[in-house]
Every structure is written in structure tokens, then in C-alpha cells.
Image (cartoon, rainbow, N blue to C red):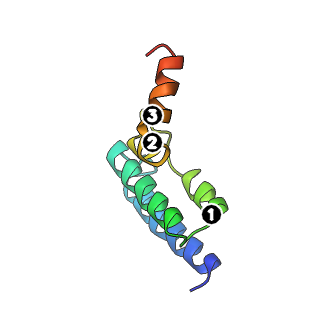
Amino acid sequence: MDLKDIQSELIYRLQCDLNYFDGRLPRDYAIAWRAYFAALLEWGVISVSVHYALGSLLPEIEDDPVEMIMLGREEADAGDKAAGS
């Protein structure tokens, strides 16, 4: 399966979930999708550009735990401290 096929399959699966929830993906599901895409990126199954394209289909997540795991707590904590949290 090439990168285009993988991207198409992932978009199809995500679209099925979005359709199921009438286009409003619950927070927990959005986090699960983000984590799934992050793992595929980390293991080289998808490219950065595919990861970005798939992520753009998901709703924004405030305090996204996937982002904290990927970037590391120290970097995330530094951002929180700079913002005054």
C-alpha cells in the first residue's frame, strides 16, 4: 500500500466517524484520532504533510495530551509558564 492509498484509507475512516457524529467529533474521539495519526507519523507510516492534512480535519483540542506527549512536558510546560498559567 503506497502513501496515497494510506492517506485515502485514513481519510475514509475518519470521515465515517465524522459522519456518525454528524460532523461534531467528541473530544475523546478527536484525541484518539490525533494519537493514532501521531503514532503513524512517528513510525514512518505517514509523512509530515499527510499528518498535517489529516490533523486539519480534526477539531481543535485545548490542552491536547497528544501534543504534550509528542513535544514533551518540558516544552509544553515552558509554553504554559510563558502564557502565565
Tag 3 secondary structure = helix
User: Residue, x 55% and y 70% (percent of image)?
Assistant: 44
Residue situated in front as seen by the camera: 75 or 4? 75
Residue 51 x/y as whole percent: 58, 59
Q: Earlier in the sequence, mark 1 or mark 2?
A: 1
Contact? badges 3 and 1 (CB < 8 Å): no
Residue 37 x/y as whole percent: 48, 60
Tag 2 secondary structure = loop
User: Residue, x 62% and y 66% (percent of image)?
Assistant: 47
**Amino acid, disc 1:** Val
Tag 1 secondary structure = helix
Q: In the figure, residue 32 lies in which quadrant? A: bottom left
Q: Residues within 10 Å of mark 1 (few under 14, many from 20)?
A: some
Instruction: Give the CA distance from mark 2 to mark 3.
Output: 6 Å
Q: Is residue 42 above or below residue 30?
A: below
> Could you say which disc has been placed on residue 50 in the image?
1
